Image: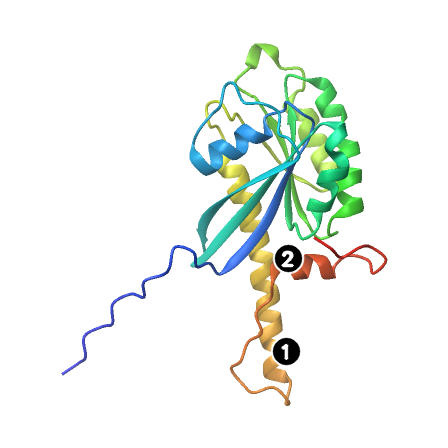
């Protein structure tokens, strides 16, 4: 008589297969905090105050059977906090660069933010350009085509969102997480293949890859490796 199938393994709510650190960057007032709040808690704070320093929240996603814990850091956009937030690029494997489609000046700041990102973060970081506040249609100053153009030129993913009505917010974060997850899985497979080919290593043993350590390892040796 065939044995009854074993019940599915219960997972601890704190368990996860992959941890991803993602940063939100962009000028103050573009809606970074509300994008985070909408994604993690499905809330919109109409009277939200500017972020002081750095805040973060987490959300778990299931991607191709893996439980992915997204640790999202909301960085202040004000100039006086730039020295504080720079250190938080370390270990990040993804970034959402947010601008306000109703403020041309926030769009013009994109090259500065990209320069800072590339100076302090891993060169392999997955970056998405996000045009937020699409619900304010009558106040739009930045056409969609301009966002698409700079994203294509800089090799970025692109999307437009509204934290107020929730349009595309989940999709923005999920697309970034899915892209990173694909990179991580590919590297894990490559690592396992190397182990099978290495005679000194016992067969069937895999060495887990820590995503944040991978990101640090990609940085030039002359940079500080602290997080």
Q: Position of residue 68 (x, y in %)?
A: 49, 54
CA gap, disc 1 to disc 2? 21 Å
Residue 160 can be seen, yes or no: no
Residue drawn at x 56%, y 62% is: 185
Quadrant in the picture for residue 197: bottom right
Q: Residues within 10 Å of mark 2 (few under 14, many from 20)?
A: some
Q: Which residue is mark 1?
A: 194
What x and y, as percent, mark residue 87? 73, 46
**What colouring style does the render use?**
rainbow
- Left or right: 137 with respect to 152? left
Q: Front-most of 120 and 61? A: 120
Of 45 and 102, nearer the camera is: 45
Q: Give SS at disc 2.
A: helix
Point out the residue furthest to the bottom here. 199
From this view, report whether residue 225 is shown above or below residue 2.
above
> Which residue is depicted at the point 48% across and 28% down?
167
Position of 25 relative to 135 (above/below): below
Say which quarter of the image contains residue 189.
bottom right
Q: Earlier in the sequence, mark 1 or mark 2?
A: 1
């Amino acid at each position: 008589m065939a044995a009854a199938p074993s019940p599915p393994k219960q997972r601890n709510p704190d368990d996860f297969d992959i941890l991803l650190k993602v940063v939100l960057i962009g000028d103050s007032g573009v809606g970074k905090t509300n994008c985070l709040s909408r994604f993690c808690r499905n809330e919109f704070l109409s009277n939200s105050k500017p972020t002081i320093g750095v805040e973060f929240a987490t959300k778990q996603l299931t991607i191709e059977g893996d439980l992915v814990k997204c640790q999202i850091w909301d960085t202040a956009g004000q100039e006086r906090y730039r020295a504080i937030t720079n250190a938080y690029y370390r270990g990040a494997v993804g970034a959402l660069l947010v601008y306000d489609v109703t403020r041309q000046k926030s769009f013009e700041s994109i090259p500065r933010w990209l320069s800072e990102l590339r100076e302090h973060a891993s060169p392999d970081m997955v970056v998405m350009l996000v045009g937020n506040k699409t619900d304010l249609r009558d106040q739009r100053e930045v056409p969609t085509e301009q966002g698409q153009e700079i994203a294509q030129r800089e090799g970025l993913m692109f999307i437009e969102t509204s934290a107020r009505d929730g349009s595309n917010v989940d999709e923005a974060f999920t697309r970034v997480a899915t892209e990173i997850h694909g990179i991580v899985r590919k590297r894990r497979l490559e690592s396992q293949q190397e182990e099978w080919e290495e005679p000194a290593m016992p067969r069937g043993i895999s060495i887990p890859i820590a995503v944040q350590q991978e990101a640090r390892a990609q940085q030039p040796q002359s940079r500080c490796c602290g997080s």
